[in-house]
Image (cartoon, helix red, strand yellow):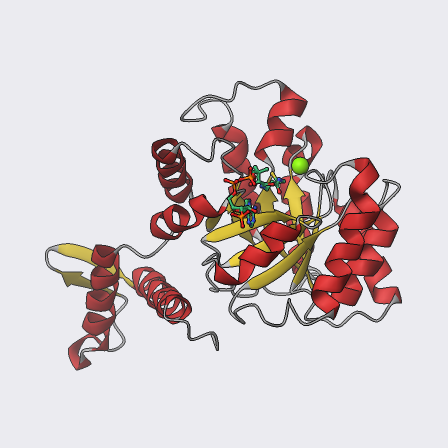
Amino acid sequence: MEHSLPPRPVRPRRSVLYLPAGNARALAKLPDLGCDSVIFDLEDSVAPEAKDEARESLRSFFADGRAKALPTGMEKIIRINSLSSPWGAEDLLAARGCRPDAILIPKVDAPDDIAAVEDALAQTDAPAVLRLWAMIETPRGVMNAARIASLARTDGTRLDCFVTGANDLIKETGVAAVPGRPWLSSWLMQIILAARAYGLDVLDGVYNDFRDEAGLIAECRDGQAMGFDGKTLIHPSQITLANEAFGIDPDRLAEAEAIAAAFARPENAGRGVISLDGRMVERLHLEMAQRLMDKAARIAARDQGDHTQ
Ligand code: COA
Ligand code: MG
């Protein structure tokens, strides 16, 4: 059954770092990192023969208090292997036991791939606060992005966020991986549009060359202009740049505050459209302004270490 569109969460997801779940040094480094979210990975970054060890490493990280000691504002996601793989069922069980904020399902081709995980979680009475994220990284996933995103309007759904998987998409399609992503961009825009149509957050894919700062900055700026909420990352050196690129532009914040102040004036009460500094401003701009101000407040709280937001 469809329900009305929920408001999109405004929690900061500027920088979302992948961390191979079996990498002890990376796990030890995590408390000092300023990423908004971390994805503990059991999938592509873990070799088949290391899957069991990585899963056990993750279980201990969540069981022995290290996960709890992370900054509370840092969102915790676990990427499992697909349920059709030899490791998927065991991963899902382990991930559910870890009580992360979300589980990330890889290589989602169609709504059924999400429904299968929703069903498995329902059977274990998983709490509703446990959310699902979906990787869109296959040709069928991109073509079906709208149908997959529409699950977000189903009662009781856990689906919250799309994550673009750039490397898999390049591998599966043969599209050239070149600066500016001239041919990839139309598929990325399709993923963004599908996410927005149904109120999901949507994250850009990774930038592999982690020593190339200028390249990452350029790709983050593109991603921000395209409409992504943030960027998935592979290395700590990429966090600050992503936080800057997907942060709030002070000029845009000042403009938003001016719009809110203008609509708050008594003479503008009940007006649908006003003029501000020679520009037409409508109530939809007020909504955008309020959303931006809300996000700015949450980002400021996150950056100042107030993790209650
Ligand atoms: N998360 C947390 N810490 C990380 C990290 C990550 N993703 N990547 C590197 N680090 C840590 C390293 O452990 C190292 O810490 P140390 O100084 O305490 O030993 C420090 O950052 C510097 O790392 P560096 O030596 O520059 O890189 P590396 O050679 O150890 O690792 C990669 C390079 C690419 C193998 C590694 O960054 C990585 O595995 N990234 C994630 C890959 C992934 O998850 N891919 C799947 C999604 S696309
Ligand atoms: Mg992938």
Residue 121 position (above or below residue 244): below
- Which residue is pictured at 38% across the width and 69% down the height? 294
Residue 99 visible to an observer of this rendering: no
Residue 284 position (above or below residue 104): below
Please identify the quarter of the rendering in which residue 216 is found. top left
Figure quadrant, ligand 2? top right
32, 213: nearer the viewer: 32
Query: Is residue 26 toward the left or the right of residue 189 in the image?
Result: right
- Which residue is pictured at 40% across the width and 40% down the height? 220
Q: Tell me how many marks there are.
A: 0
From the top left corner, tell me how far across and down residue 260 is, in percent. Answer: 25, 70
From the top left corner, tell me how far across and down residue 100 is, in percent. Answer: 68, 64
From the top left corner, tell me how far across and down residue 222 is, in percent. Answer: 38, 37
Query: Is residue 282 toward the left or the right of residue 103 in the image?
Result: left
From the top left corner, tell me how far across and down residue 187 is, in percent. Answer: 54, 31
Please identify the quarter of the rendering in which residue 284 is found. bottom left
299, 42: nearer the viewer: 42
Report the quarter where the N terminus lies: bottom right
Please identify the quarter of the rendering in which residue 221 is found. top left
304, 125: nearer the viewer: 304
Residue 217 position (above or below residue 105): above
- Which residue is pictured at 65% across the width and 33% down the height? 143
Query: Is residue 34 toward the left or the right of residue 147 in the image?
Result: left
91, 257: nearer the viewer: 91
Residue 59 visible to an observer of this rendering: yes
**Residue farthest along the bottom direction in this orientation:** 266
